[in-house]
Structure formats: structure tokens, C-alpha cells
Amino acid sequence: MLFLFLPVLPIQAASPLDIMINEISWMGEEKNGNDEWLELYNSTNLPISLDGWSLKAADGTPEIKLSGEISANGFYLLERTDDDSVPGIPADQIYKGALENNGENLELYDDKGNLVDFLDCSSKWSAGDNITKQTMERIDSKNWQNSKNAGGTPKAKNGIINTAESGSQSSSTPTQEKSKSLAYPSGIVINEILPSPEGKDSEEEWLEIFNQNDLETSLADWKISDITGVVKTYTFPEETKIPAKEFLVLTRPVSKITLNNEGDGLKLIRPDGKTVDSVEYVRAPKGQSFNRTAEGWVWSDILTPGSLNEDSETEPGVGTIKTDETNPEFQVKEGLAAVSQSFEKSQRQKIPNSFPPYLIAASLAVFSGAVIFSLKRLISSKN
């Protein structure tokens, strides 16, 4: 019998939390506060290629183009500036750019541009101590802890924590957490956007989310981001809820998202990193909003933030709908009597604005024949 032993090739694609941000030394080391490092963890039983992946902060620094491979159930160490940030442990990659001590919003993207993991600590780091130099270690998909010792556990499992409820101990490396199935509702969509208002873009731009469901839906930890230029991502606060058949209007001063007039788009992202809706446009007419309709996206001169989109003189939108599924400053418009008939107009039969061309031609032919016949009779009677 002939046995063929083939090498295990690294896979390219990954599901959310297959690769995760696992430990962060945002405070640096005891000898040098600039010796920062980050660690990724592969929770699968297969090696994964990181070629084309990226790890970046929302403010643009650091922005790391990843490469190489992360082994099955293994770790990937990123050291800042040189290989001296973690003495005695070789870095898998060197990067440039400091982590802010007051917090960062970090996002991990695969080679297809899908958000695989994120960490929103833009206002404050969830864990870690700048005085004791204890690192920030991941416990599960949402929770973090201070490392047991200064310097943390680079390229090794995170420390052991005591579980108060059971009195038992468990490793904080989240190998099983990501496999828990979470139920997210479908029918949460981007409904209308205003990229180029009549007034100041910085004050009057807005975007609108619509809940097509018959039940109130929580948007806690959902994200929405633009796709062009300086990309901004807005994370909905924990208390964000959108009632059944209602709208949520998010203004630019709140979201910080800039919709570029010469072309841009939006992505709506669930907490597990899955993009559930997106829209793109090429050029934004002044004072018109981009509206979702049954026929596709169209520009309209009738703005309807917080209510059903209205019929108006429209031009076809140069854009596409990509749907994978058929704080306290946000604004939810409620009390709309017609909301229960949301998108009802998409089901109505449209009445033609004019006769078909062949009917017009036939009518002209009959009329012309009648005129000629009448003229012939008039000429005959005179003769």
C-alpha cells in the first residue's frame, strides 16, 4: 500500500474570531515604555495565512499590513520598531506606530476586507496597568483582564483566572467562546443617506437605519463604517435599541463618518463581524438623498429622515445593494402611523406616465388618414 504524506497547507479565509487579538502591551515594558507589542491567536486546528490581512487603529496609527502564517492554535507576535520589545522571544513581524495610552479602537481584517475581530477601547483600555506594566489579556469574546505578572504572556496562553460562580479555574485563551452561536435578526438595513446636503456637510450629513422586523431590536455593539478615504467606524452604544418598523437617524457630528461627495459607501456590521448590508454610490447630487427602493437605490429631492421614503422625481442611483441576509446621542423617530406599512409602496403596481410608443404611432396614423380622407372629399365637392 502506498501512503502519500502531504504537507498541511495554510488556509486563507477565516470566520470571525478564528484569528483574534489576544494580548496587548499598550503600556510597553518596565525598562522602556516604547517597547509595545500585540499578540494574535489562532483558535482553529489549521494554520492560516495572514498574507493580505491588516490590523489597524481607527485613528490610522498603527496600521499594520500582516504577512506570513499563524500556526494551528498558535500565537503571532507583533513588536513595535524592533525585535527588542519582548526580550528572548522572536517577533513574527515588526511594525511602526505607537498605541495611545488613553485607548484605541483596533480592527483586524482578513485578505478579503472582512472584519474578523475588533476591540473598541477608544475612550479607555479595558485592562492593563501603565504603572505595574501588567498587560491586557483576553478572557473571552468581550472581556479582558490584567495579566498576572508584569510583561504578560507573549506567545503563550494567557494567565489563569478564578471563576467566582463555580470556584473553578479556567484558561483565559478564548478557544471555545467564538463557537457559541448568537442569534442576530435579519432585516436591519441601511435605508437612506444624505452625503451632500444644502448646508454644511460637517453638520447636516446623516444616515438612516431601518428595522424591518416586527420586534424591537438591540443594536448594541453593531457597527457602521464608510469605505473610502479616511474610514471611520461608529459602534452603537450598549443601550441602542430600534423599535419594530422604526428608523434610527445618525448624524455626522455623532458618528464622525464623512460621506464623500465624489463617491463612497457604507457597511453595516454585526457584533460577530459579519457585514449584513452595504451600499455604494459614485456621485452625490447636491441636496438629494440616496434612497432604498424595491427597484434599487435612487436619488431623491424629497428627504425623509425618520420616515418612509417618498416618491419623487428621481434618477437611477449609480450604486449597488449588497445584502447577505433576506452615547445616547442617536435619534429614533417613533409614532409614525404608517410605519407598519413599511416599504408598502414597493408592492404597489406603478401606473405608466405615458402611452406606449406603438399606441401613439397607431393613433397618429389613424388621425392622419382621417385628415387626408376629409381633404379629398372637400376637394371633390368643390370640383
Image: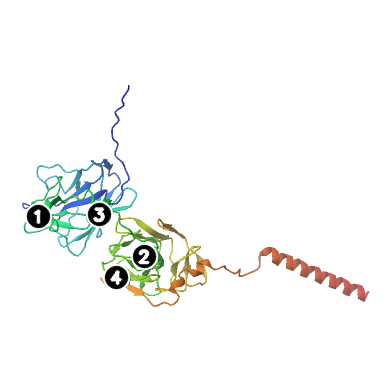
**Comes first in the chain, label 2 or label 3:** 3
Residue receiving disc 1: 134
Residue 273 visible, this orientation: yes
Q: Is residue 34 visible?
A: no
Whether the residues at callouts 2 and 3 have beta carbons within 8 Å, the answer is no
Q: Is residue 192 left or right of residue 151?
A: right
Dividing the picture into quadrants, the one containing residue 146 is bottom left
Q: Residue at x 39, y 78 (%)?
A: 335
Q: Nearer the viewer, mark 3 or mark 1?
A: 1
Callout 4 amino acid: Val
- The three-letter code of the residue at mark 3 reads Lys
Q: Is residue 96 above or below residue 209?
A: above
**Residue 168 at what x, y percent from top left?**
12, 52
* Tag 2 residue: 259
From the image, tell me which residue sits under label 4. Answer: 254
3D distance between C-alphas at marks 1 and 2:
40 Å
Measured Cα–Cα span from mark 2 to mark 3: 21 Å
CA neighbours of label 1 inside 10 A, class few (<14), some (14 to 19), many (20+): many
Residue 56 got which mark? Answer: 3
Question: Can you say which quadrant of the picture contains the C terminus?
Answer: bottom right
Tell us which disc is closer to us: 1 or 4.
Answer: 1
